[in-house]
Amino acid sequence: GKACLKQFMRDPTLFNLFSLSRKFAEETGLMDDDVKDAVEAVEAAGGTASMVMLGKTVFAYKGLEALKEFGMPFTARIDHCGVRVVDR
Protein backbone atom coordinates (compact mmCIF):
# COMPACT_ATOMS: atom_id res chain seq x y z
CA GLY A 1 0.00 0.00 0.00
CA LYS A 2 2.77 2.44 0.87
CA ALA A 3 4.55 1.80 -2.42
CA CYS A 4 1.36 2.49 -4.39
CA LEU A 5 0.74 5.67 -2.40
CA LYS A 6 4.27 6.89 -3.13
CA GLN A 7 3.77 6.17 -6.84
CA PHE A 8 0.47 8.02 -6.82
CA MET A 9 1.97 11.06 -5.12
CA ARG A 10 4.58 11.27 -7.89
CA ASP A 11 1.81 11.33 -10.53
CA PRO A 12 -1.56 12.19 -8.93
CA THR A 13 -3.77 11.68 -11.99
CA LEU A 14 -7.13 9.99 -12.36
CA PHE A 15 -5.59 7.31 -14.56
CA ASN A 16 -2.89 6.59 -11.97
CA LEU A 17 -5.48 6.41 -9.18
CA PHE A 18 -7.38 3.65 -10.99
CA SER A 19 -4.25 1.86 -12.17
CA LEU A 20 -2.59 1.72 -8.76
CA SER A 21 -5.84 0.90 -6.98
CA ARG A 22 -6.35 -2.07 -9.27
CA LYS A 23 -2.73 -3.17 -8.87
CA PHE A 24 -3.10 -3.08 -5.08
CA ALA A 25 -6.43 -4.97 -5.11
CA GLU A 26 -5.05 -7.69 -7.38
CA GLU A 27 -1.67 -8.11 -5.69
CA THR A 28 -3.16 -8.33 -2.20
CA GLY A 29 -5.73 -10.90 -3.31
CA LEU A 30 -8.69 -8.68 -2.39
CA MET A 31 -10.08 -8.68 -5.93
CA ASP A 32 -12.00 -11.87 -6.59
CA ASP A 33 -13.13 -13.15 -9.99
CA ASP A 34 -16.58 -11.48 -9.80
CA VAL A 35 -15.07 -8.06 -9.16
CA LYS A 36 -12.39 -8.61 -11.79
CA ASP A 37 -15.09 -9.49 -14.34
CA ALA A 38 -16.93 -6.22 -13.58
CA VAL A 39 -13.72 -4.18 -13.84
CA GLU A 40 -12.86 -5.84 -17.16
CA ALA A 41 -16.39 -5.16 -18.48
CA VAL A 42 -15.98 -1.45 -17.72
CA GLU A 43 -12.60 -1.42 -19.45
CA ALA A 44 -14.04 -3.22 -22.49
CA ALA A 45 -16.69 -0.48 -22.67
CA GLY A 46 -14.00 2.23 -22.74
CA GLY A 47 -13.95 3.16 -19.06
CA THR A 48 -11.60 2.49 -16.20
CA ALA A 49 -12.40 0.83 -12.90
CA SER A 50 -11.07 -0.73 -9.75
CA MET A 51 -12.26 -2.23 -6.50
CA VAL A 52 -13.42 -0.38 -3.42
CA MET A 53 -11.38 -1.78 -0.55
CA LEU A 54 -14.41 -2.82 1.54
CA GLY A 55 -16.89 -5.27 0.12
CA LYS A 56 -17.39 -6.53 -3.40
CA THR A 57 -17.83 -3.10 -4.91
CA VAL A 58 -16.41 -1.45 -8.02
CA PHE A 59 -15.83 2.24 -8.65
CA ALA A 60 -15.47 3.42 -12.20
CA TYR A 61 -15.02 6.34 -14.52
CA LYS A 62 -17.31 5.79 -17.49
CA GLY A 63 -18.70 2.34 -18.31
CA LEU A 64 -21.91 2.64 -16.25
CA GLU A 65 -23.89 0.58 -18.77
CA ALA A 66 -21.35 -2.26 -18.55
CA LEU A 67 -21.91 -2.50 -14.79
CA LYS A 68 -25.65 -3.09 -15.10
CA GLU A 69 -25.12 -6.80 -15.73
CA PHE A 70 -23.44 -7.07 -12.30
CA GLY A 71 -26.00 -5.25 -10.17
CA MET A 72 -27.58 -1.83 -9.75
CA PRO A 73 -24.90 0.80 -10.39
CA PHE A 74 -25.39 4.45 -9.49
CA THR A 75 -23.72 7.72 -10.35
CA ALA A 76 -22.08 9.89 -7.71
CA ARG A 77 -20.26 13.20 -7.79
CA ILE A 78 -17.26 14.12 -5.68
CA ASP A 79 -16.84 17.74 -4.68
CA HIS A 80 -15.78 19.81 -1.69
CA CYS A 81 -18.71 18.37 0.32
CA GLY A 82 -17.79 14.72 -0.37
CA VAL A 83 -19.56 11.98 -2.35
CA ARG A 84 -23.26 12.39 -3.14
CA VAL A 85 -25.62 10.06 -4.99
CA VAL A 86 -26.93 11.77 -8.15
CA ASP A 87 -29.42 9.19 -9.44
CA ARG A 88 -30.25 5.58 -8.79
Image (tube, rainbow, N blue to C red):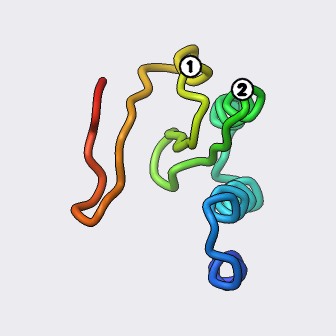
Which residue is found at the position 57% from the left and 43% from the top? 61
Of 87 and 55, nearer the camera is 87
Secondary structure, mark 2, is loop
Q: Is residue 37 left or right of residue 5?
A: right
Which residue type carries mark 1?
Glu
Is disc 1 surrounded by few (<14), some (14 to 19) or many (20+) residues within 10 Å? few
Q: Which residue is rendered at x = 29% and y = 27% of the image?
A: 87
Q: Nearer the viewer, residue 84 or 34?
A: 84
Q: Position of residue 57 (x, y in %)?
A: 50, 40
Say which label, 1 or 2, has the lower sequence index: 2
The quarter holding residue 21 reads bottom right
Q: Which mark is residue 45?
A: 2
**For the residue marked with disc 2, what is the amino acid?**
Ala
**Disc 1 versus disc 2: distance between alpha carbons?**
8 Å
Q: Position of residue 48 (x, y in %)?
A: 67, 43
x, y percent for residue 30: 64, 52
Q: Are marks 1 and 2 in contact (CB under 8 Å)?
A: yes
Q: Is residue 43 depicted above or below 68 in this figure?
A: below
Tell me what residue is drawn at x 70 percent, y 84 percent: 10
Residue nearest the viewer, comparing 59 with 63: 63
Residue highlighted by disc 1: 65
